[in-house]
Amino acid sequence: VTAPSDPLTVVIASPLEPELVERIRAVDRERLRIVHEPGLIPRARHVADHDGERPELGPPDLERWLSILGSADVMFDLDWYAPADLPKHAPRLRWVQTSRSGVGESLRRHGLDRSQIVFTNAAGVHAIPLAEFVVLGLLWLVKDLPRMEAEQAEHAWRSSVTRLLAGHRVLLVGLGGLGAEVARLLAGLGVEVWGLRRSDAPAPDGVVRLIRPDEFHTALGSVDALVVAVPYTAETHHMIGAAELAALPAGAFVVNIARGHVVDVPALAAALRSGHLGGAALDVFEREPLPVDSPLWDLPHVLVSPHRASVVDAENRLIVDLFTDNLRRFLDDRPLRNVYDRDRGY
Amino acid sequence: VTAPSDPLTVVIASPLEPELVERIRAVDRERLRIVHEPGLIPRARHVADHDGERPELGPPDLERWLSILGSADVMFDLDWYAPADLPKHAPRLRWVQTSRSGVGESLRRHGLDRSQIVFTNAAGVHAIPLAEFVVLGLLWLVKDLPRMEAEQAEHAWRSSVTRLLAGHRVLLVGLGGLGAEVARLLAGLGVEVWGLRRSDAPAPDGVVRLIRPDEFHTALGSVDALVVAVPYTAETHHMIGAAELAALPAGAFVVNIARGHVVDVPALAAALRSGHLGGAALDVFEREPLPVDSPLWDLPHVLVSPHRASVVDAENRLIVDLFTDNLRRFLDDRPLRNVYDRDRGY
């Protein structure tokens, strides 16, 4: 990847605040040409909405959009109009910075994972809010907030004992950037973090014991909670199924901040309904939006977060921090951060 | 304080599990005589219940209890029967290890704060669960869990943005053992912790800025949340009143884990009802149990915890860890930990 002498055309393809576009422009006013046409791209329905509402374009506007795509060297997010046709519509395109932490599923769906385009994800940006959701979910479960809130609704002052999160043992599946942030926060709270190791990479700070894949089922029997933070790939599809949930001790908790398909949701609902599991905090589901008739909505110790734990008010600023850093790296021919690896699938 | 050559009589006056009494006995089987008569003291209604259900004693049993008190050199908790008469009923008594983190209010109420008896509290034992409650309360407020739970109850999948706790600025009132634990946990979560400094003691780890009392009101205007963790004394009575709450920015949060009387509760309820404050997480109240007609029960962003955030399943073990360490110190004539200071009032 080298920077040409002509300005590089950078096309903003998803909603972004004008002041953030200005920050991108300021990276290099000579070597970059930033194209931001808010009328031709989706409009945000809320802060940090990267899907947005698709524009209704007449033929001339659509023509303009396709011509912009034809000039793109770099894009901020995939084309909203016809993502699968990106290599055809954007023949000069060399790099797409996406606003998603996990982009593999979407690239595979559109057949883009085998293209020559470099994709970078926004993983680190989402790690902090997702790790905060893990802390919130575990405290909500350990302190039995559903009961506290029910008693509050009845104006009932009941003495009883709560539990300490410190000293709990958590098995963390996924030791990448997201897992590292989860491990760091939980360790700071005195949680004993075990991590499932698939590769030979060193354990992130905060993980006190590494579990090999062949030790996984045994380890499940010794922990108080399972936190799923692994990327979604063919290998991780339903890696937490009925057998894994049954291996957890009675009363254990499950937190999923990865992708819905990593956990077999009917098996999870069954293990919660039977009372084997003590509860769950879930930000992701196999079908999203979660169907209105899903049993998960009403199970007593289940927190349903509508895949928004990672979406925070500071998100676009954090993503643009990453994008501007990557733009400088791209211009200087240095390695980009957060490159999607088609062989690993994330 | 020196150990006599006769065995010291240690009277257990509040509920404690037999195996924990055995651990106390094992400290020194020759120099300590442990008196534990479960029939003569309150019976626990739940784990770590230190009040317990008062026994109904006939005259002979009451006589026996008073005679036990008469022999006490050391007690675990105050006399349940007539605490104000302790100096009269227990003339040999030199030291009481209490199971409470804040004991000043109770000692003053019973007129015991001016007695010659040494009182030690169990402050450190409660610091970790209380600090966990602060983390839970702030995450519950920052992530708007009341709204998430209401939407879950409606099976409504709504996209929206949440907030990051990291980067929030918290003003912590009280930098003792409890405040230090709060600061440590919040700093680990990326919160910017400011601490109100009354003494010249150094700031605990995690506190990045010390606020002098004359800067207090100005500082209140610059923070996202106020966490009250100060002991209750004459000086801290209603130290958070209408003026302090009005000085907080609109939408700020308040967390109280100290004592109810540190915060003017009607002023707090008014600031919540008017919408000036964004919410509160409260473990303590001016009147406990909180009256059934208190407005706090039903205010939308208020978490009412019935003074049980500090009560955890591991509590008695932790208190006995402290007590046995203090017993060894007492026998060896070394300074006790957690001594109540009548001049400071805690």
Image (cartoon, coloured by chain):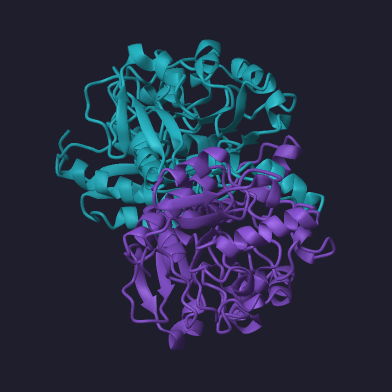
Chain colours: A purple, B cyan
| Residue reaching furthest to the front | A6
Which image quadrant for residue B102? top left
Q: Nearer the viewer, residue A261 or B175?
A: A261
Q: Position of residue A345 (x, y in %)?
A: 52, 78
In the image, residue B343 sits, relative to residue A343, either above or below, namely above
Seen at 34% across and 67% down, the residue is A335
Which image quadrant for residue B275? top right
| Residue reaching furthest to the bottom | A214
User: Image check: B249 left or right of B112?
Assistant: right
Seen at 75% across and 45% down, the residue is B150
Give the total of numbered labels: 0
In the image, residue A121 sits, relative to residue B227, either above or below, namely below
User: Image check: B45 left or right of B238?
Assistant: right
In the image, residue B69 sits, relative to residue A304, either above or below, namely above
Q: Nearer the viewer, residue B70 or A102?
A: A102
Q: Quadrant of the image for the N terminus of chain A? A: bottom left
| Residue reaching furthest to the right | A293
Q: Position of residue B199 (x, y in %)?
A: 25, 20
Q: Position of residue A91 (x, y in %)?
A: 56, 71
Q: Nearer the viewer, residue B106 or A108?
A: A108
Q: Position of residue A175 (x, y in %)?
A: 42, 70
Seen at 69% across and 67% down, the residue is A285
- Residue B141 visible in the shown view: yes
